[in-house]
Amino acid sequence: MEPDLEVVQIRRGESFKAWSHGYPFHTVRWHFHPEYELHQVIFTNGRYFVGDFIGEFEPGNLVLTGPNLPHNWVSDIPRDSSIPLRGRIIQFSESFIGDAMHVLPELAGLTALLEASRRGVLFSSRTSKALAPLMEEMMQAQGVRRIELFMMIAGLLSRAQEFQ
């Protein structure tokens, strides 16, 4: 099965997209996009597919997918059920993070992580718990606070010792 191209629309005046969704949701399908994606599962269990990897997920699952890497999370819920909040997502372009790394050499610590994300990176539950309040706040943040939160999240991810 070929993955669908998802067109990620980053709003004018914003550097990246931060959003949450329930389940089912129209973007929950085998898909890819040119942006990096940080995906944190809030509710439900199920199977996830990242590239050629298949795994089981539960609340707290935190994965960074790189550009054009096909992925999908499929929740195990009854057919006619719905979940209002299943996941929180941050999507950002290669040009955004590349430009930021060029201007801010302190971000060089992200290089290995971003390279590893091209095959998918699964973070520990400890890292996910540390990020959870930042991800939650990011969903409503505006202006400079969005950038502050993004940098805090990037910093935590770059220091994460436990990931696969």
Image (cartoon, rainbow, N blue to C red):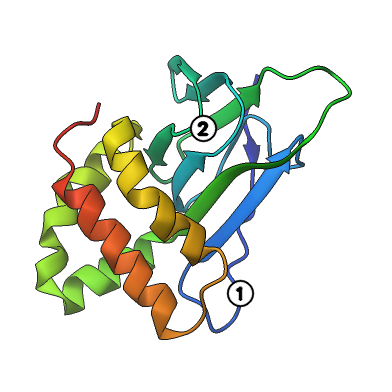
Of the residues tagged 2 and 1, which is closer to the observer? Answer: 1
Could you say which disc has been placed on residue 70 in the image?
2
Could you say which disc has been placed on residue 36 in the image?
none
Residue 79 position, x and y percent, is: 84, 18
- Compare marks 2 and 1 and give the one earlier in the sequence: 1
Q: Check disc 1: other Cα within 10 Å, few if <14, some if 14-19, many if 20+.
A: few
At x 52%, y 50%, the residue is 89
Count how many numbered circles sit on residues in the image. 2
The image quarter containing residue 51 is top left
Type of amino acid under label 1? Arg
Please say whether residue 123 is visible from this viewpoint. no
Which one is in front, 129 or 46? 129
- Real-space Cα separation, disc 2 to disc 1, in angstroms: 23 Å
Label 1 residue SS: loop
Q: Which quadrant does the N terminus fall into?
A: top right
Is residue 68 left or right of 6 when viewed as pictured? left
Please say if 26 is above or below 124: below
Is disc 2 in contact with disc 1, using a CB cutoff of under 8 Å?
no
Which residue is farthest right?
A: 80
Residue position marked by numbered label 1 in the rendering: 11
Which one is in front, 91 or 51? 91
Is residue 106 left or right of 110 when viewed as pictured? left
Is residue 81 left or right of 21 when viewed as pictured? right
Type of amino acid under label 2? Pro
Please say if 89 is above or below 147: above
Q: Check disc 2: other Cα within 10 Å, few if <14, some if 14-19, many if 20+.
A: many
Residue 19 position, x and y percent, is: 59, 58
Label 2 residue SS: loop
Q: Which quadrant does the C terminus fall into?
A: top left
